């Protein structure tokens, strides 16, 4: 039997001088939410490439979100197994 669930990811970028910040929010199908932030800093001597800063900041934010999801899954497994669980990627 196949089950399909829906989650929503929202990402917002903010650029201030040589810093690009990405804020990401994940809304799970059960109503729970996770959020993470990623930051990219451009060397002031480099030319401005907004898209590159967004890509780096987004990757860092999504990596933070991935770590939170692994922790959440580990906690849920631990509740059932009654043993310490540590998931890695």
Image: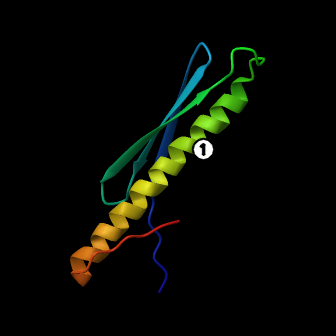
Within 10 Å of disc 1 (Cα), the crowding (few <14, some 14-19, many 20+) is some
**Residue 59 found in image quarter:** top right
Q: Is residue 25 left or right of residue 79?
A: right
Q: Is residue 41 left or right of residue 36?
A: right
Q: Which residue is outermost to the right?
A: 47
Q: What residue is rendered at 66% in x and 29% in y?
A: 53
Instruction: Provide residue 34's location: percent of width, then percent of height.
Output: 36, 48
Instruction: Provide residue 43's location: percent of width, then percent of height.
Output: 69, 21
Instruction: Provide residue 63's location: percent of width, then percent of height.
Output: 53, 50
Q: Which residue is outermost to the bottom?
A: 1
Q: What residue is rendered at 71% in x and 29% in y?
A: 51
Instruction: Provide residue 82's location: percent of width, then percent of height.
Output: 21, 81
Q: What residue is rendered at 45% in x and 76% in y?
A: 3
Judge whether 23 appears above or below 69 on screen: above
Tally of marks:
1
Judge whether 43 appears above or below 27 on screen: above
Closer to the camera in the image, 42 or 30? 42
**Residue 28 found in image quarter:** bottom left
Judge whether 84 appears above or below 23 on screen: below
- The colour scheme used to paint the residues is rainbow
**Disc 1 secondary structure class:** helix
Circle 1 is placed at which residue position?
59
**Residue 18 found in image quarter:** top right
Q: Is residue 19 left or right of residue 24?
A: right
Closer to the camera in the image, 7 or 58? 58
């Amino acid at each position: 039997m196949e089950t399909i669930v829906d989650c929503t990811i929202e990402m917002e970028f903010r650029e201030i001088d040589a810093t690009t910040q990405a804020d990401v929010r994940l809304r799970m199908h059960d109503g729970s939410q996770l959020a993470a932030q990623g930051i990219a800093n451009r060397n002031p001597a480099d030319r401005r490439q907004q898209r590159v800063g967004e890509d780096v900041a987004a990757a860092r934010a999504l990596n933070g979100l991935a770590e939170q999801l692994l922790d959440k899954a580990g906690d849920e497994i631990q509740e059932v197994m009654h043993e310490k669980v540590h998931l890695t990627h």
